[in-house]
Image (cartoon, rainbow, N blue to C red):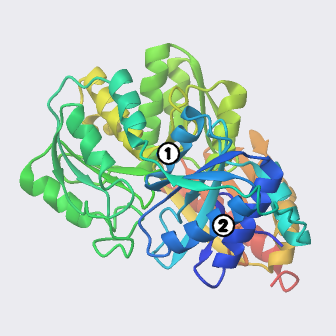
Amino acid sequence: MKLFGSSGVRGLVNSDLTAVMAEQIGVASANFSKAREALVARDTRPSGLMLENALISGLESGGTSVKRLGILPTPVLAFLTKKKKADIGFMITASHNPSEYNGIKVFNSDGLAYNQKNQNAVEKIIEHKSFARMDWKSVGHDSVANEDKLYLEAIEKEIRLNKKWHVIVDPGCGATFSLAPTILQRLGCKVTAMNAQPDGWFPARSPEPNAESLTLLAEAVRMLGVDAGLAYDGDGDRAAFIDKKGCFVDFDQVLAAYAAHVISEKGRGTIVTSVETSMCIERMVEPRGGKVVRTRVGDVHISEMMKKTHALFGGEPCGAWIHPQFHYCPDGILSSVLLLGALEGEDKDLAEIVAEVPKYPVIRRSFGCRNELKEKAVKQAGEAFKSVFHSYKNVSTIDGFRLVLEEGWLLVRASGTEPLVRVTVEGESLNAAKQIMEKGAESMKKLLGNDYS
């Protein structure tokens, strides 16, 4: 049994994720953590309240009392878990997935998402049904609390914007519907809001903010002549940006640009990102005295490595940025505010700061492989690649198999959700990327044959 993935438990409501399962996650988490008090929040999805009630029933049956925080972004729940000295926090969300999906993400008392070790411990209790339920006199109780002002006050205390920015804010009917416009207004921005009504059916656009889903935001930015468009995913841990010309800002490039700004301000330090991030981040960070550390895909792994290396900043090229001076959860609202501050510091607009970042061509291919054989296939592919690309400069096996080459890099990873092995290539030029992928694909076809399909 494998319940937890890289972003907690997630699945199709009433199929993969049921109220019964939510109750079991609640009691198992109460048993494992020995928590006396938990915070619980949710995004705007229609199934959120059902799962919240079930989860809380499990927590209370395990002896944990609960504060219901209502609809809040995931990073606010993480921030408040530490700020309010709660023992554990739960966010009910499927983040950027469609409305038919939902999930449960668990945070410890430091506001860090549960790591693999803690997730496995909770799963073991559920698998063996070794639930310890309290007698009737010792069950927990729940209450309603409104604590989001603490998050707002923390941002106001630490961040100042001097320019009168005019921005369009697009929460996509998700959990940032109220806080994002409010915080930006409080910091002096002129805010035009669109899709700022809570609706977990996500009628306006996909909860995943990407170039395809933000075409109307881009058009609005062009028509109104504003400074930028700021968009968030369903639970607010990701941000995406539209420049003043109405162009979607590439995730890799803006991540690298902001990382370079952080290092330029500090003079040195560590930036953490995943094995899938473009090499443009090294090209921007290293000349400024910074160091890039790569780790496994997933914000849980990014935050763990950041804490371990005392990193200044970290993130992934999906708009999930972590700012450790505030907390260790990706935070879309905070990222957009800090990016505006960086633009002020650089005296540039979004298009100008991103234009300084090199953009390299990326090619991706997937190869069919039975789920039970994926890890074996990745390991064997890695050994084959070392022979094919014998002049490689560096190798990493922290997440799949990644080879750094003279003219780019190649990564082979097992899909976390499908019977596939994925190969990603980035090259100094399109021709270089094609040549690397051609060799990699040929090697994969020889390796997989009929044995893995």
Q: Which residue does the image show at 18% across and 31% down from the upper left?
A: 188
Q: Earlier in the sequence, mark 1 or mark 2?
A: 2
Foreground residue, 52 or 264? Answer: 52
Is residue 343 shown left or right of residue 373? left
Foreground residue, 400 or 339? Answer: 339
Whole-percent x, y for residue 447 in the image: 84, 73
User: Dot 1: few (<14), some (14–19), or many (≥20) neighbours within 10 Å?
Assistant: many
Residue closest to the far left: 224
Quarter of the rendering occupied by the C terminus? bottom right
**Which residue type does callout 1 highlight?**
Pro
Is residue 335 shown left or right of residue 132? left
Q: Which residue does the image show at 73% across and 78% down from the upper left?
A: 419
Whole-percent x, y for residue 151 in the image: 42, 36
Q: Which residue is mark 2?
A: 57
Q: Which residue is mark 1?
A: 75
**Which residue type does callout 2 highlight?**
Ser
Q: Which residue does the image show at 41% across and 46% down from the upper left?
A: 146
Is residue 426 shown left or right of residue 275? left
Is residue 209 shown left or right of residue 24? left
Q: Which residue does the image show at 68% across and 55% down from the upper left?
A: 140
Distance from disc 1 to disc 2, alpha carbons, whole Å, reads 24 Å
Q: Secondary structure at mark 1?
A: helix
